[in-house]
Image (tube, rainbow, N blue to C red):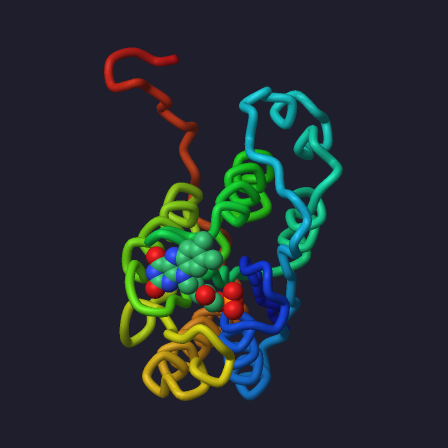
Amino acid sequence: MSTVLLLNGSPHAAGCVATGIEELARTFAAEGVGVERFHIGTRPVRGCVACGACKKNADGKCAFDDDVCNVFTAAMRRCDALIVGSPVYYAGPAGALCALLDRAFYSATDAFAGKPAACFVNCRRGGASAAFDRLNKYFAIVRMPIVTSQYWNSTHGTTPDEVRRDKEGLQTLRTLARQMAHLLNCRERADLPPPTVEPWERTNFIDNV
Ligand SMILES: Cc1cc2nc3c(=O)[nH]c(=O)nc-3n(C[C@H](O)[C@H](O)[C@H](O)COP(=O)(O)O)c2cc1C
């Protein structure tokens, strides 16, 4: 059975994003797909300082081992797919979440590569689409098939009760979970090798670097 890692990028463990996560979890359960929940928490998350240590360490871990980053990437290694939920802050994802994802994707790229992914955002009123686009950038650069739904994935509200009244938002999440479950089941049954990956032609448009 496949397992989807559900990352709550809000500081609130039982807030609006968590309400969306639970809607996803219920739908995955109905579809026979397992989930693992991960909450970013409220403790500080360091930003990437571009030290490059993760590329030199044999274990590929981020050099900062005093926050959630390496714990999160270990969870990602156990799972087959990822859904990231974020509150909208100033029309973008939460800053601590971007700090985490910058370091996790950079240090542990192989834990994410090729695994189906999606995100959803929650906001009171505006900025959902911009935040959604920003999060999808993480997935698109590491060959993660981005699973889509019936709308750009967002829920609306400032309390869990308001989110529960956002019928279309919750339906969008249920559709997303079913779409992802279908893809995971297809991949399990097809039992095909992953696509060939060419060595990276890494250029700054003009020369190899
Ligand atoms: C710093 C900050 C910035 C925010 N910016 C926006 C915004 O740009 N648009 C919006 O509709 N809501 C904004 N909000 C409201 C949050 O998106 C909303 O409270 C959050 O999604 C609730 O989810 P949670 O309970 O899981 O934290 C902001 C809230 C904070 C704390």
Q: Could you say which is closer to the camera, residue 75 or residue 20?
A: 20
- Image height of 86 relative to 209, above or below: below
Tell me where residue 35 appears, x and y as whole percent.
62, 71
- Image height of 102 relative to 132, above or below: above
Q: Residue furthest right?
A: 66
Q: Residue at x 59, y 21 (%)?
A: 52
Tell me where residue 36 appears, x and y as whole percent.
66, 67
Q: Locate residue 10 relative to residue 36 in the image: left or right.
A: left
Quarter, ligand 1: bottom left
Q: Is residue 162 visible?
A: yes
Q: Locate residue 198 relative to residue 101 in the image: left or right.
A: left
Quarter of the image for residue 81 reads bottom right
Q: Residue at x 40, y 33 (%)?
A: 198
Q: Residue at x 61, y 73 (%)?
A: 14
Q: Could you say which is closer to the camera, residue 132 or residue 60?
A: 132
Q: Locate residue 65 relative to residue 202 in the image: left or right.
A: right
